Image (cartoon, rainbow, N blue to C red):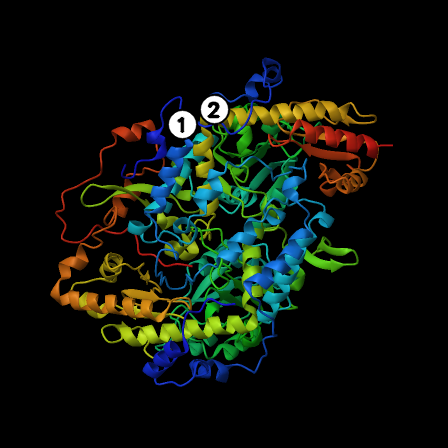
Amino acid sequence: MNAETLFEKSRPGRGNNYVDDRGWSAEHEARLPVSARRGTPPALPEVTEGEVVRHFTNLSRRNWGVDVGFYPLGSCTMKYNPRLNEQIAAWPEFSAAHPLRPVRAAQGWLRVMYETERMLSHLCGMERFTLAPAAGAQGELCGMLMVRKYHVERGDARRTVIVPDTAHGTNPATAAQVGFKVVTCPSAADGLVDVKALRGLLNDDVAGIMLTNPNTLGLFERDIREICNLVHEAGGLAYYDGANFNALVGRFRPGDMGFDLVHLNLHKTFSTPHGGGGPGSGPVGVNEKLEPYLPIPLVRKGAEGFEFESDRPLSIGRLNAFAGNAVVVLRAYVYMRLLGTAGLREVSGAAVLAANYLQHRLLEAYDAAHPGRCMHEFVLTAAKQKAQGVRALDIAKRLIDLGFHPPTMYFPLTVPEALMVEPTETENLETLEAFAEAMLQIAREVTEDPEALHTAPHHTPVGRLDEVAAAKDLDLRWTPLSRQRRPGWRPAQQAQPPAREDEHGVA
Amino acid sequence: MGFVPHTEDDVGRMLAALGLSDVEELYTEVRAALPPGDVPDLPGASELELRHHLWEIARLNGRPDQTPCFRGAGAYEHYVPAAVPSLVSRGEFLTSYTPYQAEISQGTLQAMYEFQTAVCELLGMEVANGSMYDGASALAEAALMAMRLTRKHRLLVAETLHPHWLQVLHTYTANVAPEIVTLPAPDGLLDPEQVARALTDETAAVIVQNPNALGLLEPLQEIGVHLASHPAMYLVAAYPTSLGLLTSPGEAHADIAVAEGQPLGLPLSYGGPYLGLFATKLEHVRQMPGRIAGVAYDEQGRKGYVMTLQAREQHIRRERATSNICSNQMHAALAATVYLSLIGPRGFRKIAQNNFVVAHELAEQLSELPGCSLAYTHPFFNEFVLNLPVPAEDIERELWDNGLISGLPLSRWWPGREHQMLFCATEVITEAAIHRLVAALEEALP
């Protein structure tokens, strides 16, 4: 059964009958030109419903989720996902609505969108929000397209975007996708943007800067007002990557820091489940300067109820076929209404407290990348452990043995052997203590039992997988030939664990 | 209501360990750096109280599940077997992040691999990714990929492409500023000879949707034949459900195939989350955007799955990535995989047949109403344009007053089509619903 796909479990003749025959006939077939007819049918699995249920139930048991246990994946804000969100999202009044319904048949939906836009604007100190972006990265794309258009419309086609060296990979990738030249701004020794270096990078070709605050080291950029002022003085715009907004939500606003535009990740701060990699939702907020460029559709209050705004001549256009990941927005709406500002303030305070406490416990055995007060997450470096022969990767894999999802590894890129820990506000103190004990045990094992670390994890369905071989000898879909494929097993002559294709960060 | 589990005692212990007396002290530095800004007060609520309130809002949408909907236009109501929502709502799938730690993410990773396999089968292509945001953004990314591969910047786009998809294409390519040339479809369809004549050395891609935005079947194969001997990429956007009957993009020699995967087990959800399908030829895999799962083995020779070819992606390649995409629509891809596994190859064909039968039944009855006629005589799948003797907007209003969602008034997309409506009927439309619609429309006509 190990790793066997449903395609392999398929047996000709098995299947399920979900719909009646509606009277297909030769006469119908004759209406299809021969060249329009499919030749080979798709080889989908032939399995019963019972087999499908068992297959996917067993797959789910090979997966870790917030519902399973602690998930301190830095920069991902893996907090508890309230069940009420799920229940409301499944109400047919919302889930069965066609996106092109007449607006008077969708007033509930439009009200949710309108009020969500207002709430997010209040929380971020922005003029308006678009809910269209389907994920953080699409929010970034949306934001940088607006930045581009803002300058073009002013007859000032600037080509450079500044990104700190600690930024998420999506920041430079987005700026490049929108056609900007990416210039990296170094961090100072304290892990914050080097303001002096930034001054040197600013000129009249700079379209803007993309910043996360707190930054990916979990540190608050205390010079943020000055940074935004400098960028503004040079004629650029300041973009806030909201991946780390959980540290500040309900208390402080990117608008007050001087930012012109903001993207939020509803699947982080606003508790919508991430579903194994998506869907997310990445609303973008803007101040008055950028309001004309917002994508469509936008909702407004009209004389006869809520309606879509259609007259947006300067809009960057459309990002998706319809209104974005509406049901994800609905979940976030439910969450905000449930908590209110006071509840959100409790969220950020508890997240920051938990992170500081956990950091304090771990400093007993690990070095912090930047010791001192952190915000909602902190970054450890396993450089000391590496000198003793154990990598951050080994520590991460050993945590799996001990019942925890590992932190984010090898990110930010500025920290050697980085482990980025974000406990979130929804873990109780017992869990934080147990995680700390596990990390301290691992620190002892570095000298006492390094083999346990090098060979971890020990109790998972598979051990460390050879990503380099996988990228070379590509097997990206099942075919009947896969049956004959020989496992790419090689004798373990290497003392090192199988190489990783590359280390990864997150966003 | 909130979800913070810290008791007063817990908070006290944590603060004491940090040498602090109040949580607010954690923000001293932040407060010093920012001007005093007030976050406006939004009230919270108990779960019970909030549910009452949400119910009042939900009611404003009517009961879409009990209102026959004869509208498609890029989003389609299909039957979803009960096992789909039941399986995908398992917390182990729903509440996991991107599978960065393969050893404890085999569920997501294997599902992604099975999804890729199913997408390749549907579209008739060699390799697929783990999903894009939706069909429209998948098409835009496909156009960017075609321009990277060919190093050309002219896109020939069918006039019959869904207008929202065309808008997304413009948005995504704004800075590349490709020359977007419209391929005319004077009678609702492309002319393969005319497409062939429009090809030049500068052409990066030809973009065709099938069925097209008018519901009609394009000469997919015939265009493919012309493109087979030309370096331009052939981009085909398909409607998955139709592929139980209709030529797959692969059979038509597509280089890149995309589709809106919503019809594969996902509810209409007022537009999202939907699911972008993206597939191509193996030779182009290194230019493909998005996550890809592949088979890998551990030291003991055990088979598993990993995210592979990550050197294309933003977290490794940063500003040189093939796309900035990070989060995709994995949970929707999981639903589609479960859906396709449940219905199987015979069910897939039967559902396509039912769509064809029901839509043709509807077309026949509607076109017999006084003053009504089909706008085109070409073959269609489950969507067609009806000419009306009165403005379509008026019909939409009157039918909604009768508790029906009509076809889409086409003036919404194209001025000059004030008397046309794009109707759709899928397998969920019953005989009774058709009778209701016909009676209501007859009533509404002069």
Picture layout, residue B314 above or below residue A2 = below
- Name the residue type under label 1: Glu
C-alpha distance separating marks 2 and 1: 9 Å
Q: Chain of mark 2?
A: B
**Residue B250: percent from the left, percent from the top?**
47, 28
For residue A342, what is the image quadrant?
bottom right
**Residue A47: percent from the left, percent from the top?**
39, 29
Name the residue carrying label 1.
Answer: A46
Of residue B115 and residue B248, the one placed in the foreground of this image is B115
Crowding around mark 1 (Cα neighbors within 10 Å: few <14, some 14 to 19, many 20+) is many
| Mark number, residue B32 | none
In the displayed orientation, state which residue is furthest to the front.
B48
**Residue A487: percent from the left, percent from the top?**
22, 36
- Do the residues indicated by labels 2 and 1 lie within the same chain of the protein? no
Residues at circles 2 and 1 in contact by the CB criterion of under 8 Å: yes
In the displayed orientation, state which residue is furthest to the right.
B446
Left or right: residue B290 versus residue B304 is right
Of residue A101 and residue B66, the one placed in the foreground of this image is B66
In what element is the residue under mark 1? loop
Left or right: residue A401 versus residue B446 is left
The answer to whether any part of residue A297 appears in the image is no
Name the residue carrying label 2.
Answer: B346
Report the quarter where the C terminus of chain A lies: bottom left
Of residue B279 and residue B366, the one placed in the foreground of this image is B366
Report the quarter where the N terminus of chain A lies: top left
Q: Which residue shows up at 71% across the image and 36% down it?
A: B407
For residue B107, what is the image quadrant?
top left
- Name the residue type under label 2: Arg
For residue B149, what is the image quadrant?
top left
**Residue A157: percent from the left, percent from the top?**
59, 61
In what element is the residue under mark 2? helix
